[in-house]
Image (cartoon, rainbow, N blue to C red):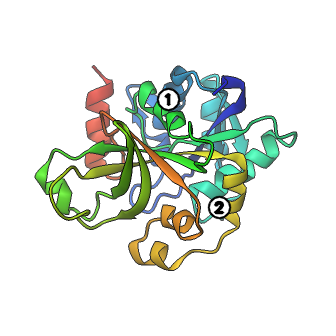
Amino acid sequence: MASQSNLVLIPARMGSSRLPGKVMADIAGEPMIVHVARRAREAGIGPVIVATDSPEVEAAVRAAGFDAAMTRSDHPSGSDRIYEALQAVDPEKKFDVVVNIQGDLPTIEPHVIQASLAALENPQADIGTLAVVITDEEEKTNPNVTKAVGSPISENLLRALYFTRAAAPFGDGPLYHHIGLYAYRRDALSRFVALPPSALEKREKLEQLRALEAGMRIDVAVVDSVPLGVDTPADLERARQLLSR
């Protein structure tokens, strides 16, 4: 997929419920959001823009040499935030694919970001996302670890059938830890944000189920590592240790 057709948008809000202001937390001398933007740039798949509701975040991002787009503060999700940003920065619709990287993934590897586009190789796929084979037995039953359930297409690609906090599917075979990074075809993102929250989405508290319930196709690229998501002070300390090396 030509790089000029892809746009990377990173939603970054200051009002995190579990760790307020985390996107501006200092890690090795720089705000966390700058680390995420740098990893996205290193992936080399297209321009990188941070979508934020905070002048503080905007200033920090621009000072580090990245672009930012200001958005409303009342968006219910990162998907809604990046959609607003997309309308502002690309009204001519030059970009065909939008890659949504969460702003709390400071250790994500560039090749993992690149893999999200592999999940869109089939033109029938509306959304691409990522997963990793679970090797830790405790993760299999941990409801905080979302599992991707899919039908194999190839060695490292699944067609998603469901996402769940339960241990699924039953029986012998791998379970997959879902990584919440998404590559949307532009029309699919427009359709997705216009949909109301779905029954299973509200039950599992997993936004991606809205797309599946609406008949959209999500393909999943299987990668080799789960990036550290910073949700707690302990996660932040771990990120500081990893990135200070």
Vertical order, 84 against 60 (above or below) = below
Task: Identify the mark nearer the N-term, 2 or 1.
Answer: 1
Answer with left or right where residue 83 lies relative to residue 25: right
Task: Work out which quarter of the rendered image holds the N terminus and state it.
Answer: top right
Residue in the picture at 52% in, 20% down: 42
State the residue lying farthest toward the left: 137
Mark 2 highlights which residue?
192
Residue in the picture at 39% in, 62% down: 163
Give the spatial CA distance, label 2 vs label 1. 22 Å
Mark 1 highlights which residue?
114
Query: The residue tagged with tag 1: helix, strand or loop?
Result: helix
Given residues 165 and 232, the one toward you in this image is 165
Given residues 152 and 62, the one toward you in this image is 152
Residue type of the residue flagged with mark 1: Gln
What is the x, y in percent for residue 36? 49, 33
Residue type of the residue flagged with mark 2: Phe
What is the x, y in percent for residue 33? 51, 37
What is the x, y in percent for residue 26? 42, 35
